[in-house]
Image: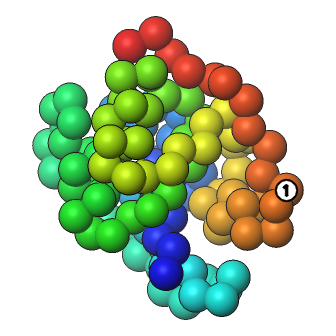
Amino acid sequence: MTKIAIPVLNGQINNLIGDTQQFYVCKIVKNSIVEEKVLSPPDHEPGVYPKWLAEIGVTNVIAESMGHKAMALFNQNKINVFVGVSIKTPKELVMDLLNGTLETNDNSCSH
């Protein structure tokens, strides 16, 4: 099973993962979305989001940008990170990932 999380703001990907107040989380079975939720994370401190998302079974995070330290923390929690994506709805980004058309780049920020 795959679970994908995306930081969201007003129905679109939030470009600042550390400032996000909500995550779109979906469960994937046989390359199809079978469950979708919008969850409020715990208060943000370094390392909290990766640990929390790992605890709820997230395997992949899609983000517009992310610092190198945050990427390392997600990876330590066995969560794959896809950064540098275009501003789209969470569902569009998930479908792009599932279809193998998700465009990413090294859009990391300095913290």
Quadrant location of residue 75?
Answer: top left
What's the coloring here?
A: rainbow
Q: Residue at x 60, y 44 (%)?
A: 82
Q: For residue 8, say whether it is visible.
A: no
Give the left or right position of residue 75, taking residue 13 as reference. left
Give the left or right position of residue 28, taking residue 77 as reference. right
Which of the image's four quarters has the C terminus?
A: top left
Where residue 95 sits in the image (x, y, percent)?
Answer: 74, 68
Q: Residue at x 19, y 42 (%)?
A: 48
Quadrant location of residue 17?
Answer: top left
Counting every numbered tag in the picture gives 1
Where residue 23 sits in the image (x, y, percent)?
Answer: 40, 57
Where residue 22 sits in the image (x, y, percent)?
Answer: 35, 54
- 62 vs 15, nearest the viewer: 62
Q: Secondary structure at mark 1?
A: loop
Q: For residue 46, say whether it is visible.
A: yes
- 9 vs 109, nearest the viewer: 109
Whether 10 is drawn above or below 24: the answer is above
Q: Residue at x 56, y 80 (%)?
A: 28
Q: Residue furthest top?
A: 110
- Residue behind mark 1: 101
Quadrant location of residue 68?
Answer: top left
Q: Residue at x 33, y 70 (%)?
A: 57
Estimate how packed mark 1 is, as few (under 14), some (14 to 19) or many (20 or more) residues with alpha carbons within 10 Å.
few
Whether 68 is drawn above or below 20: the answer is above
Q: Amino acid at mark 1?
A: Thr
Give the left or right position of residue 71, taking residue 89 as reference. left
Whether 23 is drawn above or below 57: the answer is above
Where residue 13 sits in the image (x, y, percent)?
Answer: 57, 47
